[in-house]
Image (cartoon, rainbow, N blue to C red):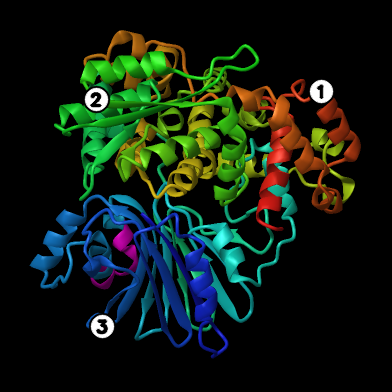
Amino acid sequence: MCGLSGELRFDGRPADVAAVGRMTASMTRRGPDGVGVWSAGPVALGHRRLKIIDLSERAAQPMTDPELGLTAVFNGCLYNYRELRAELISAGYRFFSSSDTEVLVKAYHRWGPRCVDRFAGMFAFAVHERDTGRLVLARDRLGIKPLYVTRDPHRLRFASTLPALLAGGGVATDIDLVALHHYLSFHAVVPPPHTILTGVRKVPQATIRVIQPDGTSTDEVYWRPSFTRDPRRARWTATDWRDAVAERLRLAVRRRMVADVPVGVLLSGGLDSSLIVALLAEAGQPDLATFSVGFEASGGETGDEFAYSDIVAKHFGTDHHQIRVPGEALLPAVDASVAAMSEPMVSHDCVAFYLLSQEVSRHVTVVQSGQGADEVFAGYSWYPPLAGVPRELAVDAYLGVFADRSHDELARIVSPSRLIEADASRHLVADHFATPGAATTLDAALRIDSLVMLVDDPVKRVDNMTMAAGLEARTPFLDHELVELAAACPPELKLAAGGKGVLKDVARPLLPAEVIDRPKGYFPVPAIRHLAGPLLDRVAAALTDPAARARGLFRQDWVAAMLAAPNDNRTRLGANALWQAALLEMWLQAQGV
């Protein structure tokens, strides 16, 4: 788990090593254990290292193999690197380290860019071919590891974070109005290639991008589950599905135990993280450390779920850590978590994850997390209403339960100069729902949530907040083979028992019933849902700052009305609408945009 960066020039000039150095230095918290910069003519690569596998300097990056003519930088982990290494040794390859990075380099040489088909893991990487001058970028199937790019006619730059590209300089920082529309309408999810800045794009997940020395490039999407029923499983019973999911989830958890450092668990007390604890205990993980976070109550809303996490910790005898956040610690954490964001992210879970990660990193370097189970196994409240909706009405039905607000409503919020005529979010959903596969409305909703929303909300949130503490987070529910199996599972089995039915069936022999059948929870931060005191002052300061007024994203009459009644306006899914607007301005100001 690390931070990577680089530049490839198209104009015959040498790469700007100083710019790559600045980008690399900006990601120190992602990789506090080592730094490297390499250059050769028009290309330069940078890397910050967090030591997880092969703690020696033999595994340092950028990694060059002069015999193969390849240099690579890599962020993530290949969980099956040992199996791949054995296969490559059988094919005649010699290794100088025991790292998964070197396995990636050798695998690339043997199988080319489609080596990604053989990887089980999370990854973003760049490989430069000495003999052709090509640069190849790739992201994992679920986009767990980020990859941002900026380019002009003379060069391409890339990095693990958007702020790293800003540190390199020369980036256009105008507001992308399509991204602004998505941010305010599509539940603050901005899908690739867009970011909130016109000068920065995202490489989509499950994509291989090949850039030629002259700057021409091609993209290849190498993975996409269909979300349709498999005829080979037509006669499967609910028990068959339960057993198949259990087997695949066990493998996913075991894969993510691979490390040369201790592995812990972020334990919220919900079904998903509790199930990971159960399976790690079953697999024999020694001295398992678990971590939970809680906040002070506000607005009549409790701020912790310790009662449930305590049950799980006691049941499995874990080394459990309760992290209680006092009210006075929240405001500094808000600013710190905003500064750690690669893109504006509304969810108050960011603050919880940030604070949790800062504490957890004092004890372990790797954690497993339950992120992704709700999208993959239908755990959210908006799924049951979609189950019986005819496919031809799917787009309206989905937007009706998920979108924060309609296109027409934006005119009351956004300054006229910042509005676009097209309903960008509706077009996005309609195009996605029109893609072949996903025969039912619920399948289509699960597909867009798993392949779009999940990538650019929960997954990005976990990456940004854990990496801000030099902590590697692994997500077993996003094992691509488990996602493929879940996508083929009949929707009614996922909706059963109030949601995630098949997963609850897996859990029943393993977990206490009060954890399985409890109401759905989340990382609550009540003080953000119910703005008051210093946090409300911080929100008001961001929206009335001279930079915000000069930028003019929001109508001033709307801002004034919102500040007068800070907790009266909610998005469709219950988020504080004032917080959503303020967070965007706080992020832009933090980045100096």
Task: Tell me where the magenta segment starts and ends, as one range.
Answer: 108-116
Residue 66 image label: 3
Q: Which-is-in-front pick, marks 2 and 3?
A: 2
The quarter in which the N terminus is drawn is bottom left
Q: Secondary structure at mark 1?
A: loop
Residue 364: tell me if it is visible: yes
Q: Secondary structure at mark 2?
A: loop
The reply to whether the magenta stretch includes residue 456 is: no
User: What distance separates the C-alpha of mark 2 from that of mark 1?
Assistant: 45 Å
Q: Earlier in the sequence, mark 3 or mark 1?
A: 3
Q: Earlier in the sequence, mark 2 or mark 1?
A: 2
Residue nearest the observer in this picture, 237 or 104 = 104
Report x, y in % for residue 212.
47, 79
Q: Which-is-in-front pick, marks 3 and 1?
A: 1
Q: Along the horizontal axis of the image, is 420 left or right of 127?
A: right
The quarter in which the C terminus is drawn is bottom right
Q: Along the horizontal axis of the image, is 354 left or right of 511?
A: right
Q: Residue at x 41, y 11 (%)?
A: 518
* Residue type, numbered disc 1: Ala
Residue 436: tell me if it is visible: no
